[in-house]
Each structure stands twice: as structure tokens, then as C-alpha cells.
Amino acid sequence: MTQDTLSEAEYDAITDAAAHWCMRVHAADCTDEEHRAFKQWHDAHPLHAFEYEAMLEIWDVAEHLPRPDSATVIPTQLPVQQPSRTWRQFAVAAGVCALALPLAAYTGWNLGWLPNSYEHFAATDNVRQVTLSDGSQLELNLNTDLTFSNYKDERRVTLKKGEAFFSVSHDLSHPFVVRAGEGRIRVTGTRFNVWMYQDQVRVNLIEGSVLVTSDRSLPGDGLRLGPSMQARYKHGDYMPQISQTYSGDTSLAWRNGKLVLDNLALSEALPLINRYLNNPLQLADTSTGSIRVGGIYNVKELNNLANSLPKVLPVYLSRNKEGNPVINSIPQQPPKS
């Protein structure tokens, strides 16, 4: 099957499959087998990836729509079976409504429900510089994915994974909000860096001020950072941890293609390393995690780091049942009497 010989039926089938996979991979009960099947489908043809990305755009915007109040929902009897093309019909109908009912979009904008612009940016193998529609400048680290939506009451970035450095255009009446993990960073105009790996988030402020909350479902705007301050949080944190950074802080070395590990325990270093790796490293136990590591590394060559660790640290590598490398400390020999 090639793109120029696709029939309408074949193209419709790809769109239907993209809608199906978009719903399944976002479902809480999606299995590992389904994830593998999705990846196989996604990589089988360039159009599969293209249609899936288009469905993700619809999905991301839909997440920002207000949910109906449960008290006002009228229960209805759902049919036992839905037609196979329901999702496609819904997507087409949504597109028609967007074109035919500009008044609805205007109302959604005025109520703060819908953005008037939506942008998606990603960086894979190289650092990328982008300019948002509001004039803000961003630098994206390797393996970074984010979206930008411009709402009436705020400019909103959702950092899905990775790391970005922000130079935000100043606008007191139109705050700039970064959603990362379960928390939020709120600014009006400043320069700062946001790093995220799994559920861990770190915010470094360079200039201006930001308000950081570790759980955006809680009331209030969070804790205020000043220049040369850092905030950290992870899943379940009621408040972020605030600290002062020192003059030799190297957390922004990625902008020059470097990762600097300044005598860190392996337990602290691995989240910084793993976000660059195809197969993340794991620790065998807490004692291994206490071993310290240092050095300056090229971020594009970090996939070679695992094999070099036993040459510089008292460790050896093994594999877990998933095939990922595990770092083990070498037991120390007791002194001879």
C-alpha cells in the first residue's frame, strides 16, 4: 500500500484505526499487548503516524473543554452496540461545526473554554528553537514534546515530556502558564527552565519571578521563586521543595549539548541520564544508588554511558526480565586479618 494508490475506503480505514488507537492508548485499561500492537500499526506506514497525530490534536484540545456538571447530566439509555464509524462521524461533525458555526468558537473563546490558536512542537535528536504565536521564545531539549494554546485568560503550555527553556514575552493581563506533571508554573514575563522526567519536575528561575504549585487541583497560585532559585516536585507532593542555586549551577548545560554530573549519587543522576536513553538504567538496590558519579557528557552520546560505567565505578551491569540494564554494586571484600 502506497500513499498515491490509496483508495477512499483505505484512507477511511486508516482514519478509523487512528481514532480507535487514540482512545485505546489513553484508556486506563490499555494492555501491554495493545501498546505493542499500536506501535506496530503506527510504524507500518507514514500515513498511520500522520492520521494518529491529527487525532491527538483533537484529543488535546478536547481535554481543555469544560466537563458538564454531574448534577445537570440527564441519564440516557445507551445502545448496546455503537456503529463502527461513530468516532469518525463525530470527528467529521466536529470539523463541520468548527467551519459552519464560527459563533460557537467565538463564544467558546469569550468564556475561556477554547483557544484561538493551538501549536504543537517536538524535538527529537537535536535542540530546537521555536517562537510561539505570542512572541515567546523557547529552546527544546532532545526528546521534548509540548503544546501551546492561547486562551482569553491565559497562555498555556503543556509539557508532555522533556525539558524547555522559556523566554516569555511580558503581558501582565495575559499570564503564561506551564503545566508539567501534576503541577503548574505561572508567570507574566520571565526566563526560566522546566525539566521533567516521569513524575519528577524541576523549575530553575533565571530572571523575573514565577509561582510554582505541585498540584494544580489545590487552591492558590503556589510558592514564589526569585532569580537563582529552584523548585522540585513529584507526584503526591503537597508543596514543591524550594532551594537556592549556586553560581556554578550546571543544570542548563544541555543548551550547549552537555550533561554535567557534579559528584551526584547515582539515585540522583539516573533521572537526568535516563531521559536521554533508549533503555533506561535501573538500580539494583539503595546501596548502589549511593555510589557517586561525576563528569561532563555529550547528550547525544549518552546511550553509550551504560557500558562505560563499570570502567569508572565499582559496579557491574545485569539485565532485568524486561531486558533493561540494571546497575549493581560490586561487593567489597572484607579486609584480610
Image: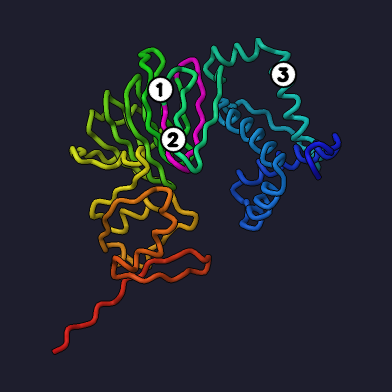
Q: Quadrant of the N terminus?
A: top right
Q: Earlier in the sequence, mark 2 or mark 1?
A: 2
- Residue plotted at (42% across, 21% down): 136
Amino acid found under the numbered disc labelled 2: Leu
Mark 2 neighbour density, 10 Å: few (under 14) some (14–19) many (20 or more): many
Q: Closer to the observer: label 2 or label 1?
A: 2
CA–CA distance in space, label 2 to label 1: 17 Å
> To which residue does mark 3 refer?
97
| Residue 313, image x, y percentages | 29, 66
CA–CA distance in space, label 1 to label 3: 29 Å
For the residue pair 217 and 140, the one nearer the viewer reads as 140
Q: Is residue 80 visible?
A: no
Which image quadrant is residue 235 in?
top left
For the residue pair 300 and 223, the one nearer the viewer reads as 300
Regarding mark 2 in the picture, which secondary structure is present there? Answer: strand
Regarding mark 1 in the picture, which secondary structure is present there? Answer: strand
Q: Is residue 128 left or right of residue 31?
A: left
Residue 140 is marked as 2
Amino acid found under the numbered disc labelled 1: Phe
Q: Is residue 274 left or right of residue 75?
A: left
Amino acid found under the numbered disc labelled 3: Cys
Mark 3 neighbour density, 10 Å: few (under 14) some (14–19) many (20 or more): some
Q: Earlier in the sequence, mark 1 or mark 3?
A: 3
> To which residue does mark 1 refer?
176
Q: Closer to the observer: label 1 or label 3?
A: 1
Magenta span includes 148: yes
Q: Earlier in the sequence, mark 2 or mark 3?
A: 3
- Residue plotted at (31% across, 41% down): 253
Give the magenta-colored segment's residue range: 138-154
